[in-house]
Every structure is written in structure tokens, then in C-alpha cells.
Image (cartoon, rainbow, N blue to C red):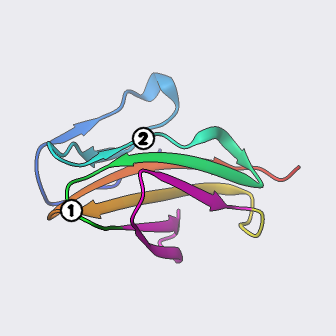
Amino acid sequence: MVTLFVALGTLSSVGAADNHTVTSVHGEKVKLGQNYPNPAVGRTYIEVDFEGEEATLTVYNVVGKLIEERVVTSKLIVLDVSQYDEGIYLYTLEANGEKITKRMTVKKQ
């Protein structure tokens, strides 16, 4: 079981029954959708919503290595995961002083 604690806002946890246990901040003005398709093969999409002109998306593997970081300016993020190793990743959207983290699985074709 992977659990990530973020220091801002109210913490809540997704139930273990759904096999996606990640503790994250639920922002009032920042929204981070679950990537689709999940598991991802080749390319995956993430819908976001935030106030302001930009936000930051970071992707880490489960051992904490930074895989990707990018500035986000649109409401739909397209991630090319074709070069990612197969496994579990955590992605975080940071905007307006809030952070939200979700989990994604990457599979090879």
C-alpha cells in the first residue's frame, strides 16, 4: 500500500477496496481528475481545473524519483507515457498554493 501525505489543506484517503490508496489534499479551487485510460499505455489524459494562468504538474515513480515536471496552462493534460517504465506513478498538480496528488498505473503494450 502506498500512502502519500501532503501538508496543506484537509487530508482524506481513498478506500483500500478500490486498490488506489493515496492520501491527498482536496483543494477548493484546484481540481485534478483521474488519468484516463488507467492503466495508461502510450498516452494518457488528465483533466484539471485551477484559478490563474498556470499550474505545475509533477510525476514521480513510487520510489520518489522525479520523472516529469511541466507547467500547465490548459484544462486538459496529455502525457506521453510511452517512455515510462511499467509501474505505479504519483502525479501532483500544484496551483494557488494547493496540491492534489493522484495515482496512475503505466503498462506496456
Residue at coordinates 16% horizontally, 46% vertically from top-left? 29
Q: Residues within 10 Å of mark 2 (few under 14, many from 20)?
A: some
Q: Is residue 2 visible?
A: no
Prevailing SS of the magenta stretch: strand
- Name the spot of residue 76 as percent of width and height, x first: 49, 50
Which residue is nearer to you in this view: 56 or 76? Answer: 76
Left or right of 34 on screen, residue 8:
left
Q: CA distance from mark 2 to mark 1?
A: 18 Å
Q: Are marks 2 and 1 in contact (CB under 8 Å)?
A: no
* Type of amino acid at the residue the image marks with label 1: Gly
* Type of amino acid at the residue the image marks with label 2: Gly
Which residue is nearer to you in this view: 45 or 11? Answer: 45
The span shown in magenta is: 56-81
Q: Which residue is mark 1?
A: 52
Residue at coordinates 59% horizontally, 56% vertically from top-left? 78
As helix, strand or loop, the secondary structure at mark 2 comes to loop
Q: Residues within 10 Å of mark 1 (few under 14, many from 20)?
A: few
Q: Earlier in the sequence, mark 2 or mark 1?
A: 2
Q: Which residue is mark 2?
A: 33
